[in-house]
Every structure is written in C-alpha cells, then in structure tokens.
Image (cartoon, rainbow, N blue to C red):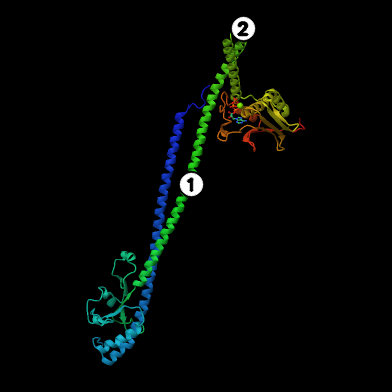
C-alpha cells in the first residue's frame, strides 16, 4: 500500500508558504514604521505645545511689565509736572537740570515715586537727545545714550518697549541660573505735562526711559518651559511605550491567526491529497481482493492435498495461506473504511450486540485470564446496523486485549444518559492511551503495533459517526484506556 504522506502538491504548498512568509514580513515593518511615525508626531506635537504654552507665558509676563510701566510713567508724568516742573518754573523761570539744586529737586520727586519698585534705572532725554536726568548722575548731559528710535517718541508720542539680552535667547535655557542683568526690559515713553486746554493733548517735554532687570522673571519662565518640555517628553515616551505594547500585541495575535490559517490550509491540502489518494488505493484494493481470494482458497486446497508432503513445504504453504488471510483482512478493513457502508436502520438491542462480540472472544479471553466486568442497563436500543456495531465493539475489545498483553480486566458500562444518548464505556486495565500519540489515534494507518493496520479505530469512528454518534478517547481515572461511545438513543416505548 502506498505511503499516504507522499507529497503530491509540493509546489502549491511551497507557494502558499512563500506568500504567507511575505505577509508575515510585511507586518512588522509596517508596524515599525507606524510606531516611529507616531513617536515623531507625539514628540513634535508635545514640543509645539510646550513652545506655545511657554511663549504665551512670556507674552503674559511682558504685558504685565508693560502695564506696570505705563502706570508708572503716567504717575511720573503727573508728579514731575506738578511737584517739579511748575514749582521750578515759578521759582527760577526756566528748567536747567544741570543746576544741582534743580537736579536734586527732580531726583527727590522721582525717588519718591519709584521708591521700593524694581527699577534699575530711569532717564529723561530732552529734544536734543541728551540725557537731561538720570538716576545715575554720571549720565547727565551725555548724548548717544538714547536708542535710535527716540524721534518716534519725541515727535509722534508713541511708546516702545524691548527686551535687551546680554546672551543669545536660544542659549538662555542652557545657562540657567542666569547672571543678573542678562535680560533687561527697556520702555521708552513721552514725558508729558498737563494739557493746555481740557480737549487738547498734553505737550511732550521729553522722553522717559525706564529699564528694569527681568532676569528673575525670565528665568522663571524658562524653568516653567523646561518643566513643560520634560513632562511632554515623558508623557510621549509613556504613550509611545503603550503604543508599542499594543502594536506588538496586535502583531502577535495576527501572527497566531496567520499561523492557524496556514495550518488549516495545509490540513485542507493534505486532506485533499489523502482523499484523492484514498480513491486510487480503494480501487486498487478492490481489484486485488478477488485474486487474493483465489490465492487464499488455492493455498487452503493445496494444504489439504499435501498432507503427506515434507514439513518445509507445509510451512511454506501455511505461510502463504496465513499471509493471504491477513492481507484480505487488511484489504477488507481498508475498503470498509474508504467506502463505508450505509448503515441499515434496524432497531438494535445494544446488549445483544455486546453478547455476540463477547461470546466470540470469551474462549480466548478465558485462556488469557482476561475478566469481563459488565454493568449494562437493560433495554437500551439504537437505530442502526447490528453487523457494523458488532464490528466496532469487537475492534475496541480486541484493542483492549492487545494493550493488556496478558491477564487483566475489561469493564463495559452501558446506559441511557437521559439526554438522548446511549453511553458505552469500554475501560481496560492496560497502560492506557499514550498522551503524545492520542491526537493521532483516529488517523487512518496510525499504529504502534507490529503488523497492525492502524485502521481499527478509524473504522470504529466511521461506523459510529454513520450512526449519528460520537467517539471519545481518554484514560480512566485509575489508568487504562477508556473508549467512550455516544449513540442516539431510541425511546424504549418505541422498541
Ligand atoms: N486499548 C488501548 N490501549 C492503549 N492503546 C491503544 C488501545 N487501543 C488502541 N490503542 C493505540 O491506538 C493505535 C491505533 O489503534 P487501531 O485499532 O486503529 O490500530 P491497531 O490496533 O494498531 O491496528 P489493527 O486495528 O489493524 O490491529 C494502536 O496502535 C495503539 O497504539
Ligand atoms: Mg486495533
């Protein structure tokens, strides 16, 4: 008989494997690109967000400082005009700050206003852009200290503010703590008197420059910005980790599914191969059955005719006869399996079939010291073919006998489980089913016995399923092989 595992479809299987491998390779690279892309998006979004938040914090700081400066300038304007300009004009007829007395008077007014405020320096420029007043007396009378845009302030009355940095802004985050004076806010505003008429504009008397060291505030914004960036990066890393975990999990699930699909495909291929091979082998078996019958009967005839022949000839004839019997049994078994007979639908008393099978074995089992323990309910009926059921029970019992290989006990339990089934348990006292080969025992031609065909259990399965039942192989709780058969029960009243 041919080897059922001959690979007839090698090409198609290999093609299947290649395409499956391609898909498998494509998946991780796709997942990897997706992970890195998501990391890039998360990091860019986090950085953009942190830049936006810290920038608005900086803007808020500037606006707050400018508002403070605006109010200070207004206060200074009014105080200088009332407490210095008017009394000085009345006393001296003109304003000349180079005169110590006038300077000190103005200095007094200015200091009374800015006292306790975080101002670094205050200067007043006149229309010739010279320093008319400064909290630092050495600047007095000096020109060239005013910024270039002072004309806008003197002529247009506009105000301007700017941050003067002694280090490049991009270096600042890396040079924390910053040296005092690293960031200075300069605000330039017109110095105005009182309006000449209620509806008119107040006249511009000069330009007022305030400088304030905002390094501390700036440093706080930088620290805040640093915290946001670090937190964003940390949350990005956590999110990325989670994403990676999810992707890997999905990958594993997908790989497992693909594996299963491939296994199923392979199984379908091998089943198809087995089916077509089974058809070929069945027709060959059918063809050799008749000549085999002739060989067997001829060998039997020759054996009878050669009673007086020498022992060698008789041995050869007996070997021909025995092997022909064994071979026809195998061929018949195979044909039963490959082309199962449609079972009759007679009303069958299960106990009678068991009686029949045990009666056949009893003599032999007596000699082998195999005891039979039988607990079978009376009146258990099924619809089916008693010859086929006999064959199935016989195969199971003979397997038990072969497994025990000597004295032992075979227990048979049969009952109606009241769930629509007749349950038959065959339990022997042999070594039990081997767990590693258990999944293959119902495969045709699987055998561990020398001279076995491996068709016994597949034939049992085919007979039982053709009766609408099922078979289960297991081991008994106290050892030994347990073959459990369920058959559709027939209501005893119908029987
Ligand atoms: N009662 C049992 N205890 C332990 N192993 C068993 C038992 N019945 C079957 N087996 C195992 O299952 C295998 C398949 O059994 P199956 O009846 O299909 O074929 P076989 O008995 O090997 O050959 P054949 O039935 O043609 O004599 C056996 O070779 C054996 O390894
Ligand atoms: Mg067997």
Q: How far apart are marks 1 and 2 (CA)?
A: 81 Å
The residue positioned 68% from the left and 27% from the top of the image is 369
Tell me the number on the disc at residue 308: 2
Q: What element carries label 1?
A: helix
Q: Position of residue 66 (x, y in %)?
A: 36, 74
Q: Mark 1 points at which residue?
A: 250
Q: Answer left or right for 210 relative to 298.
A: left
Left or right, residue 475 beside residue 219: right
Foreground pick, 365 / 495: 365
Image label count: 2
- Which residue is at the front of the view, 385 or 479? 479
- Of residues 208 and 379, the one drawn nearer to the viewer in this rendering: 379
Task: Classify mark 1: residues with Cα within 10 Å, few (<14), some (14-19) or many (20+).
Answer: few
Q: Which one is nearer the viewer's eye here, 452 or 224?
A: 452
Q: Earlier in the sequence, mark 1 or mark 2?
A: 1
Q: Is residue 80 above or below residue 432?
A: below
């Amino acid at each position: 008989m041919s080897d059922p595992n001959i690979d007839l479809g090698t090409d198609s299987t290999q093609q299947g494997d290649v395409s499956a491998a391609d898909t498998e390779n494509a998946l991780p690279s796709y997942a990897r690109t997706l992970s890195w892309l998501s990391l890039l998006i998360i990091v860019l979004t986090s950085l953009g967000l942190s830049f936006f938040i810290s920038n608005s914090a900086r803007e808020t700081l500037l606006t707050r400082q400018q508002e403070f400066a605006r109010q200070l300038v207004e206060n200074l304007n009014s105080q200088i005009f009332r407490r210095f300009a008017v009394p000085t004009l009345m006393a001296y007829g003109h304003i000349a700050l180079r005169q110590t007395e006038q300077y000190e008077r103005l200095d007094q007014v200015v200091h009374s206003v800015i006292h306790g405020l975080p101002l670094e320096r205050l200067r007043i420029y006149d229309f010739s852009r010279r320093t008319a007043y400064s909290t630092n007396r050495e600047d007095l009378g000096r020109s060239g200290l005013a910024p270039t845009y002072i004309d806008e302030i003197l002529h247009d009355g506009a105000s301007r503010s700017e941050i003067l940095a002694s280090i490049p802004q991009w270096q600042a985050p890396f040079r924390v703590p910053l040296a005092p004076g690293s960031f200075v806010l300069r605000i330039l505003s017109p110095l105005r008197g009182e309006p000449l008429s209620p509806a008119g504009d107040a006249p511009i008397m000069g330009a007022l420059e305030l400088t304030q060291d905002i390094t501390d505030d700036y440093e706080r914004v930088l620290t805040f910005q640093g915290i946001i960036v670090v937190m964003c990066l940390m949350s990005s890393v956590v999110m990325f980790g989670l994403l990676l975990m999810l992707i890997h999990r999905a990958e594993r699930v997908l790989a497992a599914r693909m594996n299963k699909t491939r296994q199923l495909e392979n199984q379908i291929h091998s089943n198809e191969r087995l089916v077509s091979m089974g058809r070929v082998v069945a027709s060959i078996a059918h063809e050799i059955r008749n000549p085999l019958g002739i060989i067997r009967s001829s060998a039997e005839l020759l054996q009878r005719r050669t009673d007086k022949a020498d022992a060698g000839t008789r041995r050869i004839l007996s070997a021909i006869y025995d092997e022909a019997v064994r071979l026809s049994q195998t061929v018949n078994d195979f044909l039963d399996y490959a082309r199962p007979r449609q079972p009759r639908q007679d009303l069958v008393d299960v106990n009678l079939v068991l009686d029949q099978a045990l009666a056949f074995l009893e003599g032999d089992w007596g000699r082998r010291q195999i005891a039979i323990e039988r607990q079978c309910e009376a009146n258990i009926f099924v619809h089916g073919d008693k010859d086929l059921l006999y064959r199935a029970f016989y195969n199971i019992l003979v397997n038990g006998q072969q497994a025990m290989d000597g004295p032992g006990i075979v227990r048979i339990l049969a009952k109606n489980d009241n769930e629509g089934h007749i349950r038959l348990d065959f339990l022997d006292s042999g070594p039990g089913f081997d767990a590693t080969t258990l999944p293959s025992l119902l495969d045709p031609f699987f055998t561990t016995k020398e001279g076995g065909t491996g068709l016994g259990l597949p034939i049992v399965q085919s007979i039982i399923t053709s009766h609408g039942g099922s078979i289960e192989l297991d081991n008994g709780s106290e050892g030994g092989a347990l073959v459990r058969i369920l058959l559709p029960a027939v209501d005893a009243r119908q029987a």
